[in-house]
Image (tube, rainbow, N blue to C red):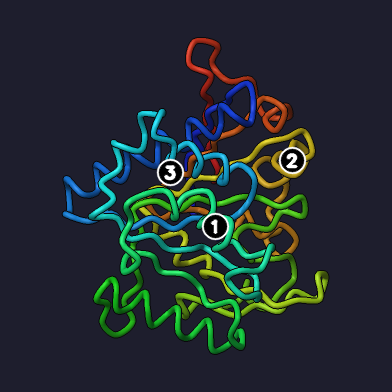
Amino acid sequence: MPRAVTIHYQVSPTPADVARSAASLFAATAAAAVKARGLARIAISGGQTPKAMFELLADQAQPFRNQVPWDKLDLFWVDERCVPPNHQDSNYRMTDEALLSRVPLSPQRIHRMEGELDPEVAAARYESAIRNAFKLEGAQTPTFDLIFLGMGDDGHAASLFPHTEALDNLSNIVTANHVPQKDTWRITLTWPVINQGREVVFLIAGEAKAEVLYNVFLGPYDPETLPSQLIRPASGRLNLLLDSAAAAKLPEPEVATSTGTLELK
């Protein structure tokens, strides 16, 4: 049986407003994690909305840059394409250009997935890197302070694509996933690890996402077809930052706060 969760969604007018809300959440969560535990560990995704968030975080004219405790932040990736780090499709390259090259984050705190390696080797090396960074023992799994996710038009999250083997991996932290529909390999965190995050947030914008968003959260439970349905955090809370176009098929949010909730049983 799937875990019951409460979905909290915040609806902003435009994708730019979603990115601003995401940057604010990134900075606030990092600061709170450092205050509570002395260190912040955040896992990020690729895509246009995260890119806009990164640019805001790096912008010296914006308030977010100075709110992030860069010297106590460890940055990880949710998933990566199997390409070199300088490839135009690399999630790492996008993040480096939009954020890493512009902020005082030590290279030792940047934990990238090595997409240029054999996928199985890259996955094993990243799992080892996470275990070392979190000082995990035995079967322990990491608890990230914040995990940002996107959602594909096909309902995938991270690189957990419909009807792929990674959906059945319950034991690893990281796995290599062959994606036949794209004729490629990806490296991804597994969904049980994503569900251990203290805060798990989907960033979703655009009218093309309205239908899949409805199907994932209000349609029948079929995670083989819609893997985003597997994302039900152990905290019992899942957050969505949406623009109005993506949220068009969800129940109307509260007018005063532009927020709404859904209960998933």
| Residue for point 74% across, 71% down | 163
Give the CA separation, mark 2 to mark 3: 21 Å
Q: Nearer the viewer, mark 1 or mark 3?
A: 3
Question: Are there few (<14), some (14-19), or many (20+) residues within 10 Å of tag 2?
Answer: many
Precedes in sequence: disc 2 or disc 3: 2
Give the CA separation, mark 2 to mark 1: 23 Å
Question: Is residue 236 depicted above or below 245 in this figure?
Answer: below
Q: Nearer the viewer, mark 2 or mark 1?
A: 2
| Disc 2 secondary structure class | helix
| Residue for point 30% across, 42% down | 68
Question: Are there few (<14), some (14-19), or many (20+) residues within 10 Å of tag 3?
Answer: some
Residue 23 lies, in percent from the top left, at 44, 37
Residue 157 lies, in percent from the top left, at 62, 57
Precedes in sequence: disc 2 or disc 1: 1
Q: Is residue 60 left or right of residue 53?
A: left
| Disc 1 secondary structure class | loop
**Amino acid type indicated by mark 1:** Pro
Instruction: Please name whichever residue, 200 or 109, is drawn nearer the observer in this view of the structure.
Output: 109
Question: Are there few (<14), some (14-19), or many (20+) residues within 10 Å of tag 1?
Answer: few
Residue 101 lies, in percent from the top left, at 45, 54
Give the CA separation, mark 1 to mark 3: 14 Å
**Which quarter of the figure is the N terminus placed in?**
bottom right
Extreme-top residue of the structure: 256
**Amino acid type indicated by mark 2:** Lys
Which residue in the protein does label 2 denote?
A: 209
Question: Is residue 71 depicted above or below 29 in this figure?
Answer: below
Which residue in the protein does label 1 denote?
A: 2
Question: In the picture, residue 35 is in which quadrant?
Answer: top left
Residue 237: mark in rendering: 3
| Residue for point 42% across, 49% down | 102
